[in-house]
Amino acid sequence: MARNLRLGVNIDHVATIRNARGGRHPDPVRAAKLAAAAGADGITAHLREDRRHISDDDIRRLIQEIDLPLNFEMAAMPEMLAIATAHKPHAACLVPEKREERTTEGGLNVIAGHNHLLRYVGSLKSVGCRVSLFIEPDPEHVAAAHRLGAPVVELHTGAYCDSAPGPERDRHLARIVAAAARAAELGIECHAGHGLTYDTVGPVAAIQSIVELNIGHFLVGEAIFGGLDSAIKRMRALMDVARAEAEVAPGA
């Protein structure tokens, strides 16, 4: 029997819209509350060094006002470690970060960055944060995350989502399947996210060793046309159908 598939809703780009004009609207904390009411299992927020979307005050309010677990995405840098250890969110996901990128372009290089990341994983675990590493869907990177002592990995699904349907997308999906299988072998909890849409979520949701999907930009975009509640409920339904079909397929 597959484990329950959770949905984490990333609210970063509600803050992006707010910051485009300044002021307080739209409020990402309000979006988090709406996501909770619509069936989200957790909230994800990335506090970047340049504060391009989520702000320090957003993090403070999310901790104080939201009952759902907060997944705090952060770069492995001293400033963010200090903020995380002060607030002690439920989870801290270490992600790569470059000022010039529009969005996260890939996973952490956990092999080359082992010595640098080791301090951050240990420090976050010591204050009770559930540490996740955002990595490429590669079994070797999963093994490197295990050596770092991370209890969770999140597989970067961007290449899969950005590729056209057909052999190329199938190859990227196979990489995700293999990485998730390696995580299961090593006893690491496996999450996935980045770029997932209504059209691409099903095959990833069907991977039974993945227990959480984190989705944000697409849901915020769809909310413009039909509301955040509707977008989240539709995504949740697609995930549930794909997971249920995957559970019965082996014995069909």
Image (cartoon, rainbow, N blue to C red):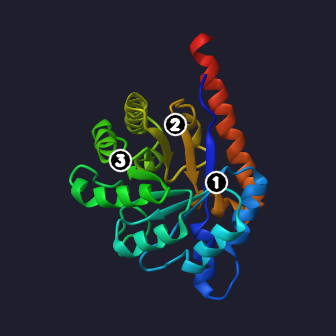
Residue at x-position 36% and y-position 56%? 122
Front residue of this view, candidates 231 and 53: 53
Residue 11 is tagged as none
Whether the residues at callouts 2 and 1 have beta carbons within 8 Å, the answer is: no
Amino acid at the residue labelled 1: Gly
Label 3 neighbour load within 10 Å: few <14, some 14-19, many 20+: many
**Left or right of 143 in this view: 213:** right
Q: Is residue 214 visible?
A: yes
Label 1 neighbour load within 10 Å: few <14, some 14-19, many 20+: many
Label 2 neighbour load within 10 Å: few <14, some 14-19, many 20+: many
Upstream in sequence: badge 2 or badge 1: 1
Q: CA distance from mark 2 to mark 1?
A: 15 Å
Q: Position of residue 250 (x, y in %)?
A: 57, 15
Q: Is residue 79 above or below residue 249?
A: below
Residue 210 is tagged as 2
Q: Which residue is mark 1?
A: 42
Residue 136 is tagged as 3
Report the quarter where the C terminus lies. top right
Residue at x-position 57% and y-position 68%? 12
Q: CA distance from mark 1 to mark 3?
A: 22 Å
Q: Is residue 200 visible?
A: no
